[in-house]
Image (spheres, grey):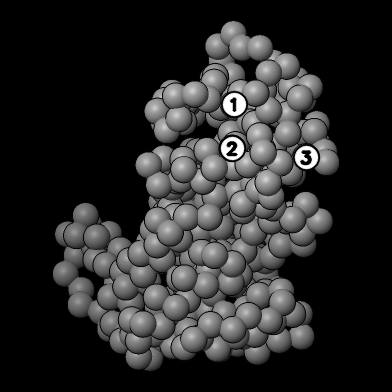
Amino acid sequence: MAIVVIRQDNKIELWKNALQNADKTIKVYSYLEDHPKEDITMAVIWKHPRGSLSSYPNLKCIASAGAGVDYIFEDDTRPKNIPITRIVDPYLAGDMSEHVLAVILAHLKNLNTYKLDQVANVWEPKDYLRIKDVTVGILGLGELGSLTASDLSSCKFNVQGWSRSKKSIAGVKTFSGAEEQKEFLKSTDVLVCLLPLTPATEGILNKELLSQLPKNAYVINVARGGHMVDDDLIALLDSHHLSGACLDVYHTEPLPKSHPFWNHKKVHMTPHYASVSDTSSVIPQIVENYKRLTTGEKLQNLVDSDKGY
Ligand code: GLV
């Protein structure tokens, strides 16, 4: 039994060493080094090269190194019928909540516009918004969405949330299902997308949905680029229906230099950094699952393959 770490960024050694240091008795390999494929029972992955999972005949678990698992389901060469796990971690949820709070406050107080004004040597005081007058609508009330909603509520925002099935969160007005989406959207001043990306949610941030928001609404996408129809967003920003958007995720990452978001005055971009797995916090749950694999116990943080999250 052994673990292989598969990821294409510069964190592969960090993850391999963190897993190894957590338990010296476990054999951990990077997929880039020579390794005995038949010994591998767990693959700890993040945006793996398509097809790389099919070379492990004894693989028993695919462990996503992040909260999202959409990239695993997109790889139809992956071994099917083995469990997929994901990260559920207080820092991952807390970091997201802090990021969303920072973005909303910057929007209310025009901080990004003032930065642009500064660069252009413009002195132009603007009206600002107050927390008590703003309703934030969270699309998606999973681990990250629920915490973000209740944290924003503690900060005195009016908070409402929409999810596929009904959720109950103290201090948050909740809506569910297609029939309640209209009502949720029409009273949302700041929309925050925290949905999982699945075939059902792909392209959900389109003209039809976004134009149901009130005029001057602000949109924050911290989920996946695949939720957004980029041209629809640009059209609604240019027609002044939406006042702005803050995006952390894109269809292609890094975002190609030719993409219109780069130079759009109403689009505030961050480079998919809102909430990133911290190895010191998340490695123990992966090691625990590896041990459970050996004993046949039920794994933690299992993904529902039918739902895709
Ligand atoms: C980050 O995008 C994650 O899914 O953890």
Residue type beneath disc 2? Lys
Which of the 4 image quadrants contains residue 110?
bottom left
- Is residue 210 among the parts visible in the rendering? yes
Tag nearer the camera, 2 or 1: 2
List the residue tagged with mark 2: 291
Q: Is mark 3 within 8 Å of ligand 1?
A: no
Q: Measure the alpha-carbon separation of dots 3 and 2.
A: 16 Å
Kindly indicate whether the residue at mark 2 contacts the one at mark 3 (C-beta within 8 angstroms): no
Percent x, y of residue 215: 52, 83
Residue type beneath disc 3? Ile
List the residue tagged with mark 1: 3
Q: Measure the alpha-carbon separation of dots 1 and 3.
A: 15 Å
Q: Give the residue at x 66% y 75%.
A: 163
Percent x, y of residue 43: 63, 31
- Is residue 193 among the parts visible in the rendering? no
List the residue tagged with mark 3: 82
Regarding mark 3 in the picture, which secondary structure is present there?
loop
Instruction: Tell me how many marks there are.
Output: 3
Q: Measure the alpha-carbon separation of dots 2 and 1.
A: 11 Å
